[in-house]
Image (cartoon, rainbow, N blue to C red):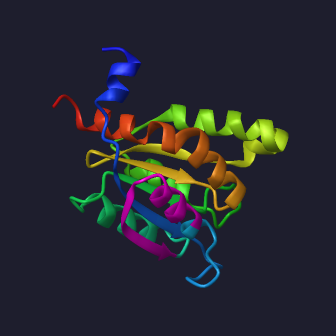
Amino acid sequence: MSLESHRAHAPSSIGFAVITISDTRDASTDKGGPLLVAGLEQAGHRVAFRALVKDEPAEIEAAVRAAVARPDVDLVLTTGGTGIAPRDVTFPTLTRIFDSEIPGFGELFRALSQREIGSAAILSRACAGLLAGRVVMALPGSPKALDLALREIILKEAGHLVAQSRGPA
């Protein structure tokens, strides 16, 4: 099956979960989560689950597992905690629980980021993987980085990713 055929058979409206991971943000100061929600809804998708958790492994894991357990969630996006600071534990937490990784996401995100921010792109540990048959993508907390990921990767490939993660119909 060609790429065009795969995309033609992909769902056009997807149920997303958006999870903000931060020690410093709350519902009133979170900019990343609302940016993702607005971009997804504007593109015709629905946000079925929303959470804001501390940058703590147990909280991150519990929120992501709760999201993938929902039948109305097809794809999970997390924002925050992907840097290299000691408190940034999103990457090691998620890569530990993934059933399998999708390395191309982080590679492509960093390549696109390099065009905008130069060599500082190496500081991002954006990653993606599969958990319980759902795609989980970990994004930085920066609004500019989120906009880039939405425009250049997520909105273009979400349906294709979901269709492929489900397997043959």
Task: Give the answer, above or below, for where 104 lies relative to 82.
Answer: above
Q: Relative to the observer, which residue lies in front, 55 or 2?
A: 2
Please identify the quadrant where the N terminus is shown: top left
Observer-nearest of 93 and 81: 81
Q: Residue at x 34, y 49 (%)?
A: 13
* Image x and y of residue 105, in percent: 53, 37
Q: Is 3 located above or below residue 51 in the figure?
A: above
Residue 32 image position (x, y, % from top left): 61, 66
* x and y, in percent, of residue 28 in the image: 60, 85
- Which residue is at 48% across, 56% downward? 40
- Residue 46, magenta (yes or no): yes
**Residue lying farthest to the right in this orientation:** 118
Q: Position of residue 120 (x, y in %)?
A: 81, 45
At 41% across and 54% down in the image, what residue appears? 44
Q: Residue furthest left?
A: 169
Q: Residue at x 53, y 76 (%)?
A: 54
Is 167 one of the magenta-colored residues?
A: no
Q: Tell me if 66 is positioned left or right of 126 in this view.
A: left
Task: Say if residue 114 shows up in the picture.
Answer: yes
- Disc tally is 0
Q: Which residues are magenta?
A: 35-53
Q: Can residue 126 be seen at all in this image of the molecule?
A: no
In the rendered image, the residue lying farthest to the top is 1
Quarter of the image for the C terminus: give it. Answer: top left
Q: Is residue 113 left or right of residue 140?
A: right
Which picture quadrant has residue 34? bottom right
